[in-house]
Image: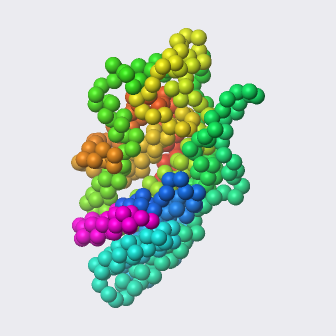
């Protein structure tokens, strides 16, 4: 870890601790975990299952810790109740601390600083000690949870080709480990696989291709200036502020918020597994390929010079990851209730730009349309993906930590 990265984590730790009196401890640690991951994760490093699962294990540990202190929900990891009078914030802080330290030992100084400041807000005594013990127990359980499915294949994906046909020498960015993770709550990686993409000889396909050709082109004269900005914004939108807005609503307990973040994380992980499996199963072409080649339909005129607004991701088109993610996030938020002030989203690559949506439906609509306006997805894919995301979220919501 570089000095700059360590300093960034330390600054985040101090900032989050300074607002502990007015912000929920679970939200604070969730955001700190993100800062630790961003600073310690190296994009080209070999896949590390503990690093990959660090965020979900942190939220899961925080849930088990908070719920062991204030038992309102069924324990997912069968963690025993904490001692009477245990401190919830101390339990949550300890749980997050232990998981993050296990995944990012190089960030120990910053993690310990954050933990020291969090515990300093708790009065010394049996309650604090019991909370710390509860946090250790929850983290130990979370660190054993999840991982790779030993039966899953880790062979890299390569598109099929005929003898003599050129194939790219760079494989898809979808590391095979992503589809080889053990689902948290799905029966299998294929449990929510959608039906196939629309047929290339269908009227719907002609409509889809025409829409993205017109609206998703880099040189489009039909896409509005606002939609151009939204396409660039949603490609890397950060939901952290939206999640915090949900957690900050009046009357919410530490355990309720911990469950909320854990459900979001577990559903997101299951979504990722299902998404990668479906993409590699169908291996459907992107708009740039389809439009340049004539869409596999004699009614479509090939446009070999067509360029999309956004850079085309290096993996198959169907289903749409952004669309599934938005639908999953929306469903989890809907189960908690949308704040009256709406849901604010930010983008680290567009400092100062915040998009606030009044409803989750508006969020999903904007996010999905941004992929069409960006020239990287088809509308039929967006619609099928949204439905897939809703099913995955419903599965998580119905199975995880039900109220007692």
Image spot of residue 122 (x, y percent): 30, 81
Please, is residue 397 above or below residue 19 in the view?
Answer: above
- The colour scheme applied to this rendered structure is rainbow
Q: Nearer the viewer, residue 4 or 182?
A: 4
Q: Quadrant of residue 12?
A: bottom left
Of all residues, the one furthest to the right in this rendering is 163
The range drawn in magenta is 1-27
Give above or below for 274 relative to 12. above
Q: Nearer the viewer, residue 131 or 84?
A: 131
Looking at the image, which residue is at 57% across and 60% down? 48
- The image position of residue 302, as x and y in percent, is 53, 15
**Residue 402 coordinates in the image, percent (x, y):** 48, 60
Q: Nearer the viewer, residue 222 or 306?
A: 306
Q: Is residue 35 part of the magenta span, yes or no?
A: no
The quarter in which the N terminus is drawn is: bottom left
Q: Residue furthest front?
A: 3
> Is any part of residue 360 visible from this angle?
yes
Residue 38 found in image quarter? bottom left
Residue 325 to residue 149: above or below: above
| Residue 382 in view (yes/no) | no
Please tell me whether the stretch drawn in magenta is mainly helix, strand or loop. helix
**Residue placed at 57% from the left, 19% from the top?**
293
Does residue 25 show up magenta in the picture?
yes
Residue shown at 45% from the left, 78% from the top: 134
- Say whether residue 388 is left or right of residue 37: right
Q: Position of residue 109 (x, y in %)?
A: 40, 75
Residue located at (59% from left, 38% from top):
279
The number of callouts visible is: 0
Give the left or right position of residue 181, taking residue 389 as reference: right
Figure check: 158 above or below 260: above
């Amino acid at each position: 870890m570089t000095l700059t990265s360590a300093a960034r984590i330390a600054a985040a730790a101090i900032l989050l601790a300074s607002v502990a009196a007015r912000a929920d401890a679970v939200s604070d640690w969730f955001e700190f975990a993100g800062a630790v991951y961003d600073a310690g994760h190296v994009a080209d490093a070999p896949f590390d299952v503990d690093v990959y699962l660090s965020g979900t294990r942190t939220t899961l540990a925080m849930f088990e810790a908070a719920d062991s202190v204030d038992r309102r929900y069924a324990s997912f990891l069968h963690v025993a109740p904490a001692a009477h009078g245990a401190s919830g914030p101390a339990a949550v802080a300890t749980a997050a601390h232990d998981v993050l330290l296990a995944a990012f030992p190089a960030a120990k100084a910053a993690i310990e600083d954050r933990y020291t400041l969090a515990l300093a807000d708790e009065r010394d005594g049996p309650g604090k000690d019991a909370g710390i013990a509860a946090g250790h127990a929850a983290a130990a359980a979370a660190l054993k949870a999840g991982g790779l499915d030993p039966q899953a294949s880790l062979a890299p994906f390569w598109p099929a080709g005929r003898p003599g046909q050129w194939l790219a020498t760079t494989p898809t960015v979808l590391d095979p480990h992503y589809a080889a993770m053990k689902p948290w709550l799905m029966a299998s990686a294929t449990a929510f696989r959608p039906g196939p993409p629309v047929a290339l000889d269908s009227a719907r396909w002609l409509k889809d291709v025409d829409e993205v050709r017109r609206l998703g082109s880099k040189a489009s004269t039909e896409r509005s200036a606002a939609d151009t900005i939204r396409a660039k914004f949603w490609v890397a939108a950060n939901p952290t502020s939206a999640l915090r807005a949900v957690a900050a609503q009046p009357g919410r307990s530490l355990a309720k918020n911990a469950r909320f973040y854990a459900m979001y994380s577990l559903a997101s992980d299951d979504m990722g597994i299902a998404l990668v499996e479906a993409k590699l199963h169908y291996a459907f072409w992107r708009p740039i390929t389809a439009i340049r080649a004539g869409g596999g339909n004699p009614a479509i005129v090939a446009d070999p010079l067509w360029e999309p607004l956004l850079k085309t991701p290096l993996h198959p088109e169907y289903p749409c990851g952004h669309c599934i993610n938005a639908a999953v996030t929306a469903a989890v938020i809907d189960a908690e209730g949308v704040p009256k002030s709406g849901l604010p989203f930010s983008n680290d690559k567009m400092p100062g730009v915040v998009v606030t949506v009044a409803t989750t439906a508006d969020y999903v609509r904007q996010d999905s349309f941004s992929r069409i306006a960006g020239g990287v997805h088809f509308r039929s894919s967006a619609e099928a993906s949204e439905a897939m995301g809703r099913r995955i979220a419903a599965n998580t919501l119905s199975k995880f930590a039900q109220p007692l």
